[in-house]
Image (cartoon, grey):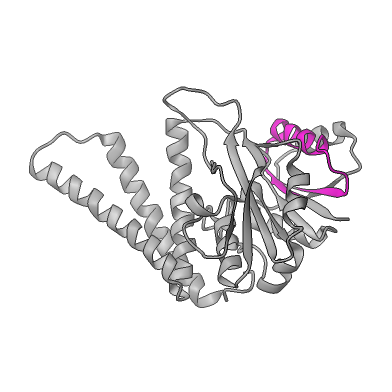
Amino acid sequence: MKISVIIATYNRPNKIKLCLRSIISNHFYSYEIVVIDQSNDYQTKKEINKLKSRKIKYITVNYKNKSKALNLAIKNALGKILVFTDDDCIVDKNWLKEINNSFKSKHITGVTGKSLPYNQRKDIDIFCPAIFNYKNGRIINKASYHATSIGFGNNMAFKKKVFEKIGYFKEWLGPGSVGCAAEDANFLLRTLVFGYKIMYNPKVIIFHNNLLSKDDFRKKLLGYKCGEVACYGYLALKGHNFANDIISKNIKSLKEKVKIYLNSVLEFKKISLKDFYYDVKELFYIIRGFIIAFYFAKKDPLGHSC
């Protein structure tokens, strides 16, 4: 078995069916799909059974923690290359072939690719998270802000031996965990910190099937903010300067917001209660992220899963 595609899913039977169909339709044959189902019911299992594909290895669990689910999938995967996407993604027909081609360079241990909106709309108030779209490919060997320079967990792949050497996903990060998000960012960054090289290949393409209203998008951003602060705070406390810079920018942005609100109060300017309430929640999520970072920086070694 050359490639194992790994997907953790939760209560999205229709979306994962579309995702799996797109993978099965790929022009590549030496692969398996490992699905870890965290759903509350049997709808996902029913939809997967309808596909009647021998490529799918289906595992159900009774917990809600994406990182824990991914780690279980890794341990059950037979492939030498582990490929990750999300249950709300549609993959390009050449996705697996391009990933496989990327690993022909022996010095490459990880691959990321384009993440584009699915059924893109021009509505002003419709947003799609986790988009990564750069024209030119490149080799990444230096850790920096993942969302603008490396990529996302909805479209990434690694040699299995990387997990065996530096550890698995941190189970205190990601959906269903205390850290809410950024399990993918943490692993990507740890890979680079340990000296491995990642290739960004713009021909490795997925489409993110998750359009959100402005309010829903902002709610999701709160979890992202908590996860990012926890992720980068943890790495900063482990002595990595690139993470210090990103944390400093978060603190600076926070100070500027507080300053704006104080000036508005002093000058008797009208404040949007909705925006104020959101910003207060954001502050609490940031503080939560810092607390998580401090706690796990002491408890959890950089090279091992929690």
- Chain part drawn in magenta: 6-35
Front position in the image: 153 or 265: 153
Residue 176 seen in the figure? yes
> Does the rendering let one see residue 172?
no
Which residue is at the far left?
Answer: 267
Q: Is residue 9 magenta?
A: yes
Residue 255 horizontal side relative to residue 90, left or right: left
- Residue 49, image x and y in percent? 86, 35
Q: Is residue 217 magenta?
A: no
> In the image, is 272 to the left or to the right of 182?
left
Give the total of numbered labels. 0
Q: Which quadrant of the rendered structure holds the N terminus?
A: bottom right
Q: Position of residue 262 (x, y in %)?
A: 15, 48
Quadrant in the picture for the C terminus:
bottom right
Quarter residue 188 falls in: bottom right
What residue is rendered at 45% in x and 54% in y?
A: 226
In-front residue for pair 117/231: 117
Residue 29 percent coordinates (x, y): 88, 44
Q: Tell me: residue 276, above or below residue 195.
A: above
* Horizontal relation, residue 187 to residue 222: left or right: right
Q: Is residue 156 above or below residue 123?
A: below
Using the rendered view, name the quadrant where residue 177 is placed: bottom right
Residue drawn at point x = 9 percent, y = 38 percent: 268
Residue at 45 percent of width and 44 percent of height: 221
